[in-house]
Image (cartoon, rainbow, N blue to C red):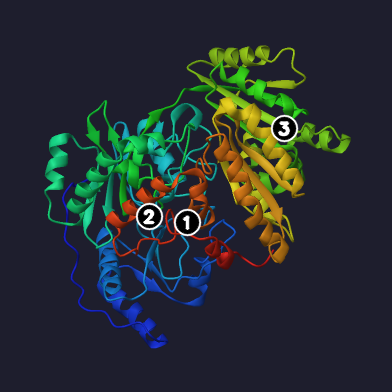
Amino acid sequence: MSSTTTSTPNIGSAPNRVSNGVKTSLKERLARVIKGDVADDSTTIQKYSRDTSVFERSPELVVFPKSGSDVSAVMSYAYDAAGRGEKISVAARSAGTDMTGGPLTDSISLVFTKYMNRMVEVGDDFAIAEPGLYYRDFEKETLEKTGMLLPSYPASRELCAIGGIVSNNSGGELTLRYGKTNKYVRELETVLSDGSSATFRPLTGIELSEKMGLQSLEGDIYRKMHALLTEHAAEIEAARPSVTKNSAGYALWNIVDKEKGTFDLTQLVTGSQGTLALVTKAKLGLVKMKAHRAMLVVFLSDIEILPEIVRRVLEVGPESFESYDDQTFKLAVRFVPQILKHFGFAQMLKLAFAFIPELYLVLTGGVPKLVLMAEFAADTVEAAVEDARHAGHALHGLPVRTKLAKSETQAAKYWTIRRESFALLRKNLKGLYAAPFIDDVVVHPDNYPQFMPELNELLKQHHLLYTIAGHIGDANFHIIPLMDLSKESQRREIIDLQPKVYKIVAKYKGSITGEHNDGIIRTPYLPIMYDERIIRLFTETKKIFDPRNILNPGKKVGGTIEDIENSMIRHA
């Protein structure tokens, strides 16, 4: 990946956009300067007006770039048009599995999955990929060539793409041990807001000085970000969330690594939802996973003892520690046929028989309130099983039932329920919509005993039907209410409940989003989590990278509650 800066392509002056005829001219203008496709037909517009959030925004144009040069041409056009006062913006989109409205726009949607979906290189312990490459294909190739993978994949691993993983700083079931995506980002090839190209990577002091000397937007970014971080170092460090994962705001506290002596803007661009720069290639580190796994499954009916269970299991050191509740459990059993369609015939038969005990529990009313899955990894089967057994022994004396799954085959049904829960909610409940708006709160595990009772009490007051699944080891909860969004009262419930939940999170110094990011849904509430000084620094950072506010505006900074209200879908 080159570290040079390239100038913006010259595409001449653009027509004014004041009528439908001008809109056609915009399409034609972009089509002439890129090798990819430009579309504004109703089918394409409708397809890219949604992600998996509660929002809908119809783009004016959908652009399918074939290369970084195409991305530069689009950004150069938008930059020049914005300079003349035209209202124009660009939002990057990969697989569209975002739960926040992050890739939605009413202007230009830049879709990478059609053409920019290549694996560029697989090295000994890294891979370089374009943003439109689906994670499932990325992992298949890295495993085949190196036996290694990117461990920060989210639950949507079969559906999501690399661009979204980087742009949201994704995490998932393995984050407890391996950390989030930013830990594995080594280099990002990007297009800046003026259409110029810049490659971000960790820089030494000498390299930083060289970058600061550039007479370009990239040089401007390095000069101004260095000044901002130097002047406000103490308050930025004080604002660092005291949780194991965070995707809220801009990660200003991750840029300067005093131990390594580096200045690394990949740590800022990662998780910025395409509001600072557009990633066209990502160099990602890979890890070798342990060969064998065993799982301790914990069934409990009294969630009051959950904090003690979590504490005892974490002391044994699981690779992952996941959970799902009784509503998710019942839903999975109800839709077993739909779940099994994802598997081959042999695996389908095995799983069908494996679900018989769960069906019996539903029929007899013995469904546990919560199911916990603690998976242990080791180099041998015996060591993995021993760790899982040790965790089970640690729970002696508590009113729980446990089951030891000694192989990945035995654990498959539990993982299937956990991973498929959100997809099941979205696809199978007629009249109700899986509404992710308080879907990603996280607190420090030490604060869990105080936090969870307050959250439960608040949710009871609102009388919502909801499911809870998530990363219990990180105290990161995915709370998904089931709502009829065709009703004004239900849409108002979202506006009413969100700040109440986030104030409880802030009380315990948690994060309003551990993985899913801000987007339309959470940007207005960042002031609950961060003080006014930090919000100003976020705004200043955005202006440094994107002085004309054309990169996905209204996300990360500048979003309003009115944006939420106006963009919300109005059907079940």
Of pointers 3 and 2, the one earlier in the residue sequence: 2
Determine whether the residue tagged by mark 3 lies in a helix, strand or loop.
strand
Report if residue 344 is visible in the image. Answer: no
Q: Name the residue under label 2.
A: 274
Q: Which label number is shown at residue 102?
A: 1
Q: In this view, does 218 lie above or below 201?
A: below
Q: How far apart are marks 1 and 2 (CA)?
A: 9 Å
Determine whether the residue tagged by mark 1 lies in a helix, strand or loop.
loop
Q: What residue type is labelled 2?
A: Gly
Q: How far apart are marks 3 and 2 (CA)?
A: 37 Å
Q: What residue type is labelled 1?
A: Gly
Q: Name the residue under label 3.
A: 370
Determine whether the residue tagged by mark 2 lies in a helix, strand or loop.
loop
Q: In this view, does 441 lie above or below 368?
A: below
In contact (CB < 8 Å): disc 1 and disc 2: yes
Find residue 566 and report its horizontal and vertical position in percent: 56, 68
Tell me: 79 left or right of 37: left
Q: In this view, does 288 lie above or below 139?
A: above
Choose top left, top right, bottom left or bottom right for residue 78: bottom left
Of pointers 1 and 3, the one earlier in the residue sequence: 1
Residue lying farthest right?
364
Toward the viewer: 215 or 241? 241
Tell me: 74 left or right of 104: left
Find residue 188 and report its horizontal and vertical position in percent: 29, 46
The crowd level at tag 3 (other Cα within 10 Å; few <14, some 14-19, many 20+) is many
Report if residue 178 is visible in the image. Answer: yes
